[in-house]
Image: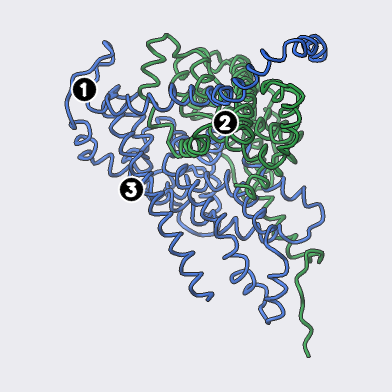
Chain colours: A blue, B green
Amino acid sequence: MASTTEVASRPTSERRPQKSSTFSRWDHKYSPYLYIAPFFLVFIITGLFPIIYTGYIAMQDWDIVRNTGTFTGFANFTFVLQDPMFWKALRNTFSIFLISSVPQILLAMFIAAMLDYNLRARTFWRMGVLLPYIVAPVAVALIFSNLFDDRYGLVNSVLEHLGMTPIGWHSEVIPSHIAIATMVNFRWTGYNTLILLAAMQAIPRELYEAAAIDGAGGLRRYISVSVPQLRPTLIFVIITSTIGGLQIFDEPRMYDNTGLGGANQQWLTITLYLYNQGWGKFDFGRASAAAWILFLIIIIFVLINLYLTRRLVADDNSRRK
Amino acid sequence: MAKVRIPTASRRPGWPIYTVLCVVLLIGLFPFYWTFLIGSGDQSTFARFDALDIDSWIPAGNFASNVQTVLQNSAVGYWRSLGNSLIVSITVSITTVLLATLAGFAFAKLRFRASEKLLIFVIATMAVPVQLGVVPLYIVFFKLGMVGNLSSVIIPGLVSAFGVFWMTQYIRQALPDELIEAARVDGCNTLRTFWSIVLPAARPAAAMLALFTFIASWTNFFWPYITLGNSDNKTLPVALQVLSANYFVDFSIVMTGVLMSTIPLIILFIVAGKQLVSGIMQGAVKG
């Protein structure tokens, strides 16, 4: 098909060069906008407009049947900020985020260092660590909710055999956070391992050789050569896991069959709170207010992250001098 | 003088490294085995499980009948949900690759005003959480009568900021400017240049983008749960939520459902796992 149009269009364009060059100039000037337009169109419809509209709904007492609201100012925001459930959700979100991201990054650094060796069948090992990534969070949550079952779960069964008291993985606050963080770690550790591995392999080998000649041992080389060189990648991993971690929904939603975050909101998270305000109680105004608060928290967190990591980099540079 | 042991890339590691890696792999594989173990039992298997009893670790023979139970559940609608997941994930992957490559081509190779600023804007949108727009998006789709319709899940996924960024990066470094110039001199319009030169050259990156988009769409839950949760048109994760709500006490059925919803991606992983690995690793170096 393409070749026929080519043959057909060539002679005409040679016969009328004037017209074709006008088209060509127009084409090169304006068509780029046409090509990027689909992204912006989709973003405006499903991103930008809803964000602004969320701000509008957050100021309303929204009537879900009539699909309109009455203006109530910041009432929804004050309700959310005075709701003890929201503060529990905030606490849980941070706690789950910390318990999942810190061990996950340390583990990923460790496994990446193993994979950085000149392994036999290295593609096999790399694929192996990535396997959990293909399991949907909903499925991961169901599997681990079973493993961490308070009464019959494998984890408690093993603990009992070891002579320890079983733990209330669902009924207690911190244990439920550990269980949910384990789900996140199961799915994402391998993924982040590969990102860090790629960054490790980009480190010039001469740096290690120089360190070895200076008498640095294996661990020392890892801490003084690998870790500083990995810093930009680490910043990237930390920021993406912050944005993702603070939005966590699937795992806490599926940790039991009610989706309310536990009898005492042990594992209620902000997004789960938002969902339950919106589609449990059908209060769209409060759900929107919660969405905006979540957005602000994420922005603040990303900024703090950037500031801290930048400072660490700066410190490191001055020390090296 | 003591010999300095220089760590070169060519040195083969000893067995301790392989042992540690084996442990890591087994931890990753264990939940799969556990899911099958429980899924092949009956209602009481889970409660009777004893870690010290060898027999507990051997799968029973109920998997096929559990699969039947899942297939017969009309609220779950396995085949329909599978079909829906395929429709959504394939559509979204194709449109994302096409539209992202088109935009990536413009950002990487065509000169136009404010292109740098617009690209930064695209990247910045990645930090905006989905939750922020979810209420109005629902209201709009509800007004249009599209709640419960697959299009409500497809439309927000037509193209992604990540995709545009990814393709821009790739086209920028993989496609020489001279090639685009040559096409222009030859009288190709930009759309033809895109179709006959850029798209074929961008194939490796486009394939990876398609893979990641497919997986992200297949495993997506939050928004599909909101818009499809109460309809007959579910995607597999949403159907899994319904299954677990129905059978919460019978873990053998729930775990069977977990496996049934994961098998398509396991197949994908067997076929394209290598590309996934290199995709993540390339993205890391560039990003």
Question: In terms of sequence position, does the residue under pointer 1 or pointer 3 come before the other?
Answer: 1
Tag 3's secondary structure? helix
**Amino acid residing under circle 2:** Thr
Task: Specify the quadrant of the image occupied by residue A135.
Answer: top right
User: Is A186 on the left-hand or right-hand side of A114?
Assistant: left
**Amino acid residing under circle 3:** Arg
Could you tell me if residue B70 is visible in this image? no
Residue tagged 1: A61
Tell which tag, 1 or 3, sits nearer the viewer: 1
Rounded to the nearest whole Å, what is the CA distance between mark 3 and mark 2? 27 Å
- Which residue lies most toward the front here? A18
User: Is B173 on the left-hand or right-hand side of B236?
Assistant: right
Residue tagged 2: B219
Give the residue drawn at x 51%, y 12%.
B232
Q: Position of residue B35 (x, y in %)?
A: 62, 37
Q: Residues within 10 Å of mark 2 (few under 14, many from 20)?
A: many
Name the disc covering residue A91, or none. Answer: 3
Tag 2's secondary structure? helix
Q: Position of residue B3 (x, y in %)?
A: 79, 84
